[in-house]
Amino acid sequence: MMRAPVKLNKNNTNKFLNKLLPTIEDPRKILNKKLDLDNFDKSISAIKIDTTWKSTFRDRHSLTDKLIIKTIIDKSITPSILEVGASTGATSLSLLDKLNGNFNRFYITDLFFNLPYRMSGDTTFFYHPKNLNCIMRVNNLTVIYRDKVNLWFPIGWLSNIYLNNSPKYRKSECKILSMVHPEIIEISKIDRSIIIEEYDIFTSWKREPVDIIKVCNILNITYFSEKEIINALRNLKAALKPGGYLFLTDNRKFESVSVFFYDLHGKFRLVKEKNGGSSITSILGKEF
């Protein structure tokens, strides 16, 4: 599928063009601290870092969350929970509502929670959190993304020229955008058992092992090689207590879930699948 790295700014485009051409929400709206939560979710979904969109919404993992709650009730535990790839934390809000306080620790993690940006006139430039290259250029007419594969020619070529000619990152001229859902930030200030932090799934988990790990829409072969997925699963295994549970979820068209029990012999055992299960179930079963 060919990609369109230049999209019209949906918030400033008439309805006819919205139907005819690729459009997207204005990500600059999340700079407004008074933005309501629904519009926050819509606007954050227009942000793309590397190959990953920050698309999310509440109750996106409803089936997974129900299975987590059922496991907690059946096992009569007050668990520590690690959510990997929580994006903005909107999905964490849904699970927290269902937990109703029945947890010991809740770690809300994602690779990137903060994004540098600077404004110049009516244009806002967003920079990669790690390499600090300009990855998005937004004005009232267009939203331009950095992309490298399957690009519409010459639009892809032109988009990268625009981004390469954007102002270079300078710390003194940039501000930091928090991509964490405002409601989660407020809740975590009150409840210190809710911990928000950046975590790279390809590195070791530095905190104590947990009882439940929830991983949604990250580990799949369209994003990573089998070798990379195995490396990530090793890190998750080390982050999980023996007797704990790993929930792996894909929900692009519909929600598919695989639930694994980490037994006292150090092996993962598949205990439940819904809607065909996760696309990497076979990898986990083969290697672990």
Image (cartoon, grey):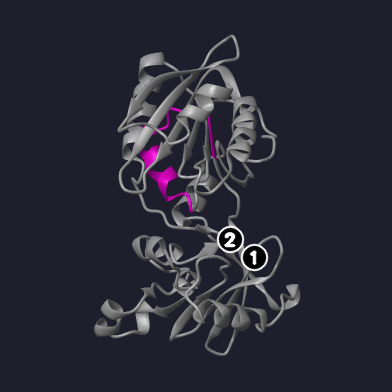
Question: Based on the displayed image, in which of its 4 quarters is residue 72 positioned?
Answer: top left
Q: Residues within 10 Å of mark 1 (few under 14, many from 20)?
A: some
Reading the image, the residue beneath label 2 is 50
Can the viewer see residue 209 in this picture?
no
Position of 74 compared to 238: left or right? left
Helix, strand, or loop for circle 1?
Answer: loop
Q: Please name the amino acid that badge 2 sits on.
A: Asp
Q: Position of residue 97 (x, y in %)?
A: 36, 39
- Residue in the picture at 61% in, 64% down: 115
Count up the numbered dots. 2
Reading the image, the residue beneath label 1 is 128
Dot 1 or dot 2: first in sequence order is 2
Residue 60, placed above or below residue 143: above
Q: Does residue 228 belong to the magenta stretch?
A: no
Residue 158, placed above or below residue 268: below
The answer to which of 288 and 207 lies nearer the viewer is: 288
- Residue in the picture at 36% in, 84% down: 12
Q: Does residue 99 belong to the magenta stretch?
A: yes
Name the quarter where the N terminus is drawn: bottom left
Can the viewer see residue 132 in this picture?
yes
- Residue in the picture at 36% in, 16% down: 74
Residue 68 - label? none
Q: Position of residue 38 (x, y in %)?
A: 34, 61
Position of 124 compared to 257: left or right? right
Q: From mark 1 to mark 2, how far is it between C-alphas?
A: 8 Å
Question: Based on the displayed image, in which of its 4 quarters is residue 64 positioned?
Answer: top left
Q: Position of residue 208 (x, y in %)?
A: 65, 28
